[in-house]
Image (cartoon, rainbow, N blue to C red):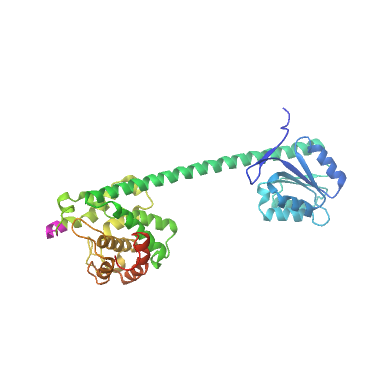
Amino acid sequence: MGKEPTMVRRGQDGAERAGTILVVDDNEINRAVLVNLFSGTYQVEEAGDGREALDKLLADRDAYCAVLLDVVMPVMDGMEVLEELFRRGWTRELAVFLITAESANSTLRRAYELGVMDVISKPVVPYIVERRIDSVIELFRARRRLRQRVEEQQSEILRQAGQIIELNMGMIEALSTAIEFRSGESGSHVRRIHDITRYLLEHTELGAGFSQEEITQISLAAIMHDVGKIAIPDAILNKPGRLTPEEYEIMKTHTVQGGVLLEKIPQMRDHAAFRYAYDIALHHHERWDGRGYPHGLKGDEISIWSQIVSIADVYDALVSSRVYKKAFPIDQALAMIQNGECGIFNPRLVACFLEAEPGIRRQIYGVEGEGT
């Protein structure tokens, strides 16, 4: 079988380019021998010293498939060029050959340490040099094709994973929204709780120590805070007036029921947001003074994400119309939160919420200025 007439490479701009061998030697006759040997198969460029060679590589490294490098040269020798190529990480992607009469073990050892693929002794034997260099260049081409294929597969996997994440979030939000509709809400409540939670984590000290991925997971988990309401009878869930003590006790069970429901969904247990969702569903009605439910947790026994969802839930419930009440003016709602009319909150949490509330009011509720 004959050789391929031209080696093709892709540059950084994506365009196809013929592979080029760069011959670097200060001896014109040596360069002519190598140029003649490879010019029938590859494009060949020459450099008379290391500095000229490095300038060519820096100008367009992707154009070259191999470098044939002499050691002893003026201005900048071959080992100095090799050191620079290694420092830039190029010897992992560019086939570099040392062609030299130098036989010192220390030089050869250092050359291999720096990523040289082969050391060819002078005077060169043409058919040996041609075969060895062709084989290595083909190895680099195969390695590059494999790497490109892996990168393409990784991109496709990431794309599919993104679609799955979007689908999961859509299903979670659909379930939570369906529950809100069942309780007579518009369904936008769960989206606002998500947005308020995210805003507080991203714009106040409450988010300190959380990565962006964790903030995303907590915000997603917040959507499921009332998922346990699916177990509450319609007569209680949609009652327009005040609940009786017995009915209120039943309503309170939505926290425990939410945790039970989430545990029974295998796909949910494997989700990164599960530990946040379970804790929020169970504990978003706990209060700082221990008078919340279902477990009467007190102070820092309540996770910060459950505390954040708790205040977000109360705020949205106050400033929104519900089947059992009209919306309170924003200033009145804030006063009720500060005065403990909706249960006692962590003072630090309240301070952070009050600091962030104007931004929440503007970005999430579309309300400018003071009050409603």
Q: Which one is nearer the viewer's eye here, 49 or 319?
A: 319
Residue 92: x, y in percent?
A: 66, 48
- Which residue is found at the position 48% from the left and 45% from the top? 158
Observer able to see residue 189:
yes
Question: Where 34 falls versus 290 (above or below)?
Answer: above
Q: Quadrant of the N terminus?
A: top right
Indicate left or right for 224 with 233 as reference: right
Image quarter for residue 51? bottom right
Residue 4: x, y in percent?
A: 71, 32
Question: Where 368 falls versus 268 (above or below)?
Answer: below
Indicate left or right for 31 with 2 as reference: right
- Which residue is found at the position 39% from the left and 62% from the top? 201
Observer able to see residue 224:
no
Image quarter for residue 121? top right
Residue 176: x, y in percent?
A: 29, 50
Examine the structure image and report whether residue 157 is included in the region drawn in magenta. no
**Start-end of magenta stretch:** 242-248
Residue 86: x, y in percent?
A: 69, 53
Examine the structure image and report whether residue 245 is included in the region drawn in magenta. yes
Q: Given the current orientation, which residue lies at the most extreme right position?
A: 29
